[in-house]
Image: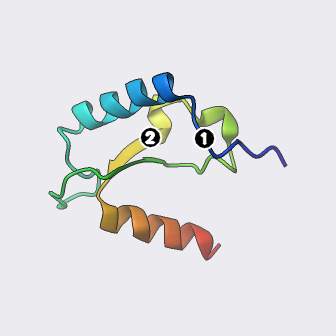
Amino acid sequence: MNRPSGRLSARPWRRLRDAVIAEQDGVCFVPDCYELIDEVDHRIPRHLRPDLTYVRENLQGLCKAHHDLKTAEEAAL
């Protein structure tokens, strides 16, 4: 399986991350959650689809609680 490296190229990632945060007004993507974004998350995990690493449509800003929940759910699969 093609696994992406743990590190993202800094400049392109920062640009995308900043765009996601701005588009979501800095607020978590989960409906009715108004916490600030702590993590920009890959909707489809990078280890499953490394080709989507830098695709804007595969990114969402999440607060820490929702990011941790999503990560735990993915680990349980």
Q: In the rendering, at what x and y percent does residue 50 appear?
A: 68, 39
What is the count of numbered marks?
2
The residue at the point 49 percent across, 39 percent down is 58
Seen at 19% across and 61% down, the residue is: 33
- How crowded is the residue under tag 1: few (<14 C-alpha within 10 Å), some, or many (20+)? few
- Residue denoted by label 2: 59
Question: Looking at the image, which residue is at 32% across and 62% down?
Answer: 64
Looking at the picture, how far across and down is residue 40, in whole percent? Answer: 39, 45
Residue type, mark 2 in image: Leu
**Which picture quadrant has residue 18?**
top left
Q: In the rendered image, which residue does mark 1 sit on?
A: 7
The amino acid type found where label 1 is placed reads: Arg
Disc 2 from disc 1: Cα separation: 16 Å
For residue 11, side relative to residue 23 (left or right): right
Q: Residue furthest right?
A: 1
The image shows residue 58, relative to residue 47, as above or below, that is above
